[in-house]
Amino acid sequence: MNRDSPRKNVIPVMVPVPTERPYSYAVPEGTDVPPGAILRVPLGPRQVAGVAWDGDGEAVESKKLREIAQVFDCPPLQTEMRRFIEWVANYTLSAPGMVARMALRAPAAFDPEPPSEGLRLTERRPDRMTAARERVLSLAADGQAWTRSGLAHAAGVSLSVVDGLAGQDVFERVEIPPRPIVPVPDPTFGRADLTPDQAKAAAHLHQKTRSGGFGVTLLDGVTGSGKTEVYFEAVAAALEAGKQVLILLPEIALTQAFLERFHDRFGAKPAEWHSDLAPRKRERVWRQVAEGQVRVVAGARSALFLPFRELGLVVVDEEHDPAYKQEDRIFYSARDMSVVRGRLGDFTVVLASATPSLESRVNAEQGRYERIVLPARFADAALPELSSVDMRKAPPERGGFLSPVLIEAMGRTLEREEQALLFLNRRGYAPLTLCRVCGHRFQCPNCSSWLVEHRFRRQLACHHCGHNEPQPEACPECGTLDHLVACGPGIERIAEEVDRHFPEARTIVLSSDLLGGVKRLRLELEAIAEGEADIVIGTQLVAKGHNFPSMTLVGVVDADLGLANGDPRAAERTFQLLSQVTGRAGRSGKKSTGLLQTYQPEHPVMRALVSGDAETFYEREVAERERAGLPPFGRLAAVIVSAAARADAENHARAIRRAAPGADEIAVLGPAEAPLALVAGRYRFRLLVQGGRRADLQSYVRHMLETAPKPRGSVRVQVDIDPQSFL
């Protein structure tokens, strides 16, 4: 592009850097740049992707203006999407350019996908006919274009047969446009047989979605009640109205069963979007979403930033799941931002869960959300009978972690040729390894956490920074051999104990750090669903909505695990997780049982689970939150200060605290050393800003940070509005 060409005008361009407003660029004569156009622009010594924005950019002298280098042949980001980026940036106190960067994560997709070279049958015929040539001509007789390799494969012939026919002008060469990555779903394809309760809920969602307009519906149904089939009718309504649909799932990479259920209902699978997709596939999904070819996406939280052309419905499945909160660079809740996306786009949002978050429940009670309740399982399948196992009265044998009550129940389950699930939300073999002689404990050199023993891999690993080291035979402190002892259980240790009691059982251990990654996890989950395992031992990923027809016993090894911290959501999260886990049992209608091993059977969470009285639990939690002014009755913001040196982090955190302005309804707590004081070699201090429900926390925190000294050296400041983690 000629830099000396006349300049027609100046436009603002949002570039992926941490600035508060777009940069100004010159537009060459004769170049059309509509708002939202995706551009290549110079930024310092490099070229980056940017988006033509609205309003004004940075004021720059005319002689210093630089020209845009390229306007990509790509659909522009819609106005609604640009407003969404600005809203997220303002709410999370993030740079708009860094939020826009999340929408531009597939740079190879900015240019159109090139067509493939194809062959189409002409009226010419070969000089000699063979059986192989006859098969090729028969397939191509419909006049459709074929790729060279596709035609050869379909006809069961070698490429040389196809090439020979092309050489005699029996085929002409044509361009084949890129194929859709998934077929278009058919909303009329496979309507399910619904119960009266499901049909009523589905009809309501269908009508609401078809009518258009913003609204949030909380679909609250017990595990196995058919929530998916119900919200599929909202998906059908959006498709009938010519709209695109986004379905968010907390573990999309593992939910193969969901994709198959979608296929059974709509005759095609949705496009997937998650971090395990191959780069080329991600690019094609991004492009075809922008072009409108992909009508439904099932994705992880980042799918919220795909450039939909005509989005008309967002479904957030398992809306309570903590996986929807991103806590890296841009801190945001995909559940909450989905509601914002729906409000800006004026369409329906469906939040689905068997254990809704307290925030969603209160929003429904106060009339901001509509609530639909599905109180019974599909086909009248009974919920599992839950009971607590008091570990003080029925303790495990010495060196073990399973109560005789649970072991006996597992034995009866195996005798009936049914499946048992043991749940422990702790990866590896043991959370701590120490020396019996000198007391040395193996700690991560980069974090204030113990190294977890992974006996299957013979490694000690940190689950916060990824550090790992070989499992030693001698204590590095005193040199004593064979005196290292594992303390506490992880799922690998439970598997070892299970093998002692049930050596003939087929046992599968499921964890996110399983060797073989997502592909192997999917295969293992399929094997369980098909009855190819007797005992399953897993972490929280087994609670993610899976359907195991033969599962009739769920044992929670340590039901107290999530309660032993200062997180104000600890009781809620424990209740949700254990409800979801025990809900894996009895989904096919067989009588089922859930056993909770606990040292606190009188705890309100345990009592609520065993009694099945979720309403009383929610009422109690709501009252406690309201009394303490905690979300959803108050607002929180966390300010996390980290640095390579502890003193630097503490000093800067104290400087921020001193800069906090006075306010009647806002208080600043801290700074205090974070519970995880050292992560990946960085020391961490936290401040907590607390205010009333209508408090303008963003303006308060923004003023506090602008007044405080700017971070220097290794000091880094992160802001987390509506924090979910307090570590």
Image (tube, grey):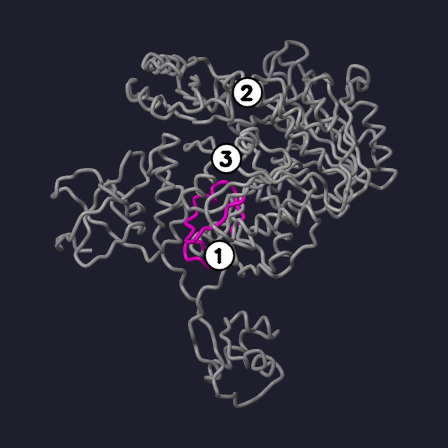
From the viewer's side, name the closer residue of 42 and 470: 42
Specify the amino acid type for callout 2: Arg
Residue sitting farthest toward the bottom: 127
Residue sitting farthest toward the top: 438
What segment is highlighted magenta in the picture? 289-315
Disc marking residue 625: 2
Q: Quadrant of residue 12?
A: top left
Label whose residue precedes the other's in the sequence (2 or 1): 1
Q: Residues within 10 Å of mark 1 (few under 14, many from 20)?
A: many
Label whose residue precedes the other's in the sequence (1 or 3): 1
Q: Quadrant of residue 659?
A: top left
* Camera-nearest label, 2 or 1: 2
For the N terminus, the quadrant is bottom left
Whole-percent x, y for residue 646 in the image: 41, 14
Task: Please report the residue visible at 56 percent of the width from the left and 82 percent of the height from the top.
Answer: 137
Whole-percent x, y for residue 665 in the image: 40, 16
Whole-percent x, y for residue 86 in the image: 34, 38
Which element is circle 2 on?
helix
Specify the amino acid type for callout 3: Arg
Position of 4 compared to 124: left or right?
left
Residue receiving disc 1:
294
From the viewer's side, name the closer residue of 722 and 695: 695
* Camera-nearest label, 2 or 3: 3
* Camera-nearest label, 1 or 3: 3
Q: Residues within 10 Å of mark 2 (few under 14, many from 20)?
A: some
Task: Reply yes or no: does residue 307 show up in magenta.
Answer: yes
Residue receiving disc 3:
368
